[in-house]
Image (cartoon, helix red, strand yellow):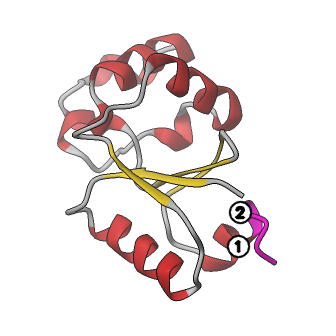
C-alpha cells in the first residue's frame, strides 16, 4: 500500500493527520505542496476521483481572494486554479495507490475506510 499525504508542515490539520498516521503505524509519504506543488496531471486525476468541490480550501486566503466569479467556475477552471496555487487545495489530501481518496482530517473512521485500514 502506498499512501501520500499532500499538505504543508505548519497546517494544524496536517499535523493532526500525520500524528494519527504515526500513532497507528501507517506508512506514508508527506509531500509539502509549497516545496513540491502537484502537477497539472496529478490535479486532473484528483478532480476525476473526488470532484473539485471537496478539494477547495474554502477557509484560506487564496480562496477568499478569488472573488465572486469562483462560484460559477467549471471543473476545468478549478484545475487551472489549483495548478497555479496549491494553497487552494484542502489539506491534507490523501492519495492511495495513485488515487485521491480523501481531503481533510475530521473523522478517523472515514480515514480508515478510505485507506482500507479496517
Q: Are marks 1 and 2 in contact (CB under 8 Å)?
A: yes
Q: Residue 116 lies in magenta, yes or no? A: yes
- Examine the image and state in which quarter residue 53 appears: top right
- Reading the image, the residue beneath label 2 is 115
Can residue 22 be seen from the camera position used here?
A: yes
Residue under the point 45% across and 12% down: 77
Q: Secondary structure at mark 1?
A: helix
Residue under the point 20% across and 63% down: 10
Residue under the point 33% across and 16% down: 69
- Reading the image, the residue beneath label 1 is 112
The span from disc 1 to disc 2 (Cα, nearest Å) is 5 Å
Q: Quadrant of the C terminus?
A: bottom right
Q: How crowded is the residue under tag 2: few (<14 C-alpha within 10 Å), some, or many (20+)? A: some
Q: How crowded is the residue under tag 1: few (<14 C-alpha within 10 Å), some, or many (20+)? A: few
Describe residue 22's horizontal placement relative to residue 66 as left or right. right
Residue extending furthest toward the bottom:
23
Residue 94 pos. (x, y %): 55, 53
Residue 26 vs residue 62, the one in the foreground: 26
Residue 84 pos. (x, y %): 29, 19
Residue 72 vs residue 104, the one in the foreground: 104
Describe residue 37's horizontal placement relative to residue 41 as left or right. left
Q: Quadrant of the N terminus?
A: bottom right
Can residue 72 be seen from the camera position used here?
A: no
Q: Range of the magenta residues? A: 113-118
Amino acid at each position: 500500500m502506498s499512501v501520500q499525504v499532500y499538505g504543508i508542515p505548519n497546517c494544524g490539520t496536517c499535523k493532526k493527520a500525520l500524528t494519527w498516521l504515526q500513532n497507528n503505524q501507517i506508512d506514508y509519504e508527506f509531500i509539502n505542496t509549497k516545496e513540491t506543488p502537484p502537477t497539472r496531471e496529478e490535479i486532473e486525476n484528483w478532480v476525476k476521483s473526488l470532484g473539485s468541490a471537496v478539494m477547495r480550501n474554502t477557509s484560506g486566503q487564496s480562496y477568499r481572494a478569488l472573488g465572486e466569479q469562483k462560484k460559477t467556475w467549471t471543473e476545468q477552471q478549478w484545475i487551472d486554479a489549483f495548478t497555479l496555487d496549491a494553497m487552494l487545495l484542502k489539506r491534507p489530501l490523501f492519495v492511495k495507490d495513485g488515487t485521491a481518496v480523501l481531503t481533510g482530517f475530521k473523522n478517523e473512521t472515514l480515514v480508515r475506510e478510505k485507506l482500507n485500514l479496517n
